[in-house]
Image (cartoon, grey):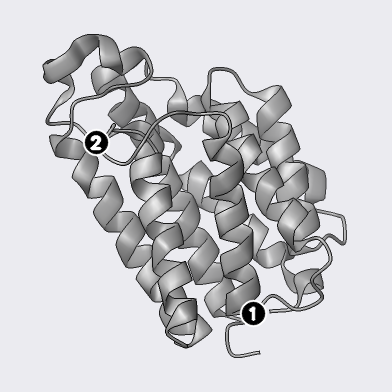
Amino acid sequence: MRNSAGKPVLMKMATAIQENKDYLGEVDGLIGDGDHGMNMNKGFSMFADQIIKSDIGFAEGLYELGNVLFSKIGGSMGPIYGTVFMGMAEAGKDFDVIDLDRFSAMLSAGLRELRDVVQAQVGDKTLIDTLEPAVVAVENAAKEGKSFADALREMKTAAQAGRDSTKDLAAKFGRSSRLGERSRGVLDAGAVSCCIILCAMADGILGYAGD
């Protein structure tokens, strides 16, 4: 995929969040304050409105998305997603073409930047349970010489499995951590939104993966 041609991928991510706004609110409302869908929809919709008439590339758009989420939506998730997307953007800003190795580098940078600001690990019932396995899946696919398309499909599978794993976990971070063992049996809203975003990103890039 050419970096300059990435706007449709960004719009697909925004649309995915918009379409799942109510679902994210329902999931969050089970053990949280129920505003995750509203906040995410606000941020992604603001971003979509901002770029709809502009000629923007993938990395530049990720930076703009991260900036909007970091500064314009409430709660902890805005800064968390903002950190991930801006980390990805910084790693990819000089790429003309985004192939598997470069996409892997961008994803890894996003996770690395997040690691600098949050202490959560896989198993703590957060979006890390979705993001880290997805990043590792792409890294491994790149090391094994798989195609970009196969790597994206494996990223989706890993993200979905990570999301689903949070149902049986007890929350250790965020407001839901106050519930302790009572937080088991419910998906983590951040893990769900992360899965939605990564799957939309993968589906968008799959249209270019053969380029």
Could you tell whether 161 is left or right of 154 in the image? Answer: left
The image shows residue 145 at horizontal and vertical percentages of: 47, 88
Q: Foreground residue, 209 or 105?
A: 105
Could you tell whether 40 is left or right of 92 in the image? Answer: left
Q: Is residue 160 above or below residue 173?
A: below
Amino acid type, label 1: Asp
Q: Secondary structure at mark 2?
A: loop
Location of the C terminus by quadrant is bottom right
Provide the residue designation for mark 2.
187
Q: Which residue sits at x=40%, y=59%?
A: 134
| Mark 1 to mark 2 CA distance (whole Å) | 32 Å
Amino acid type, label 2: Leu
The image shows residue 30 at horizontal and vertical percentages of: 24, 21
Q: Foreground residue, 172 or 28?
A: 172
Provide the residue designation for mark 1.
99
Residue 176's quadrant in the figure?
A: top left
Q: Which residue sits at x=40%, y=41%?
A: 128
Q: Foreground residue, 206 or 83?
A: 83
Residue 12 can be seen in this image: no
The image shows residue 109 at horizontal and vertical percentages of: 62, 53
Q: Is residue 122 above or below residue 28?
A: below
Could you tell whether 58 is left or right of 53 in the image? Answer: left
The crowding category of the residue bearing disc 1, from other C-alpha atoms within 10 Å (few below 14, some 14 to 19, many at least 20), is many
- The numbered dot on residue 190 is none
Q: Which residue sits at x=45%, y=30%?
A: 37
Residue 104 can be seen in this image: yes
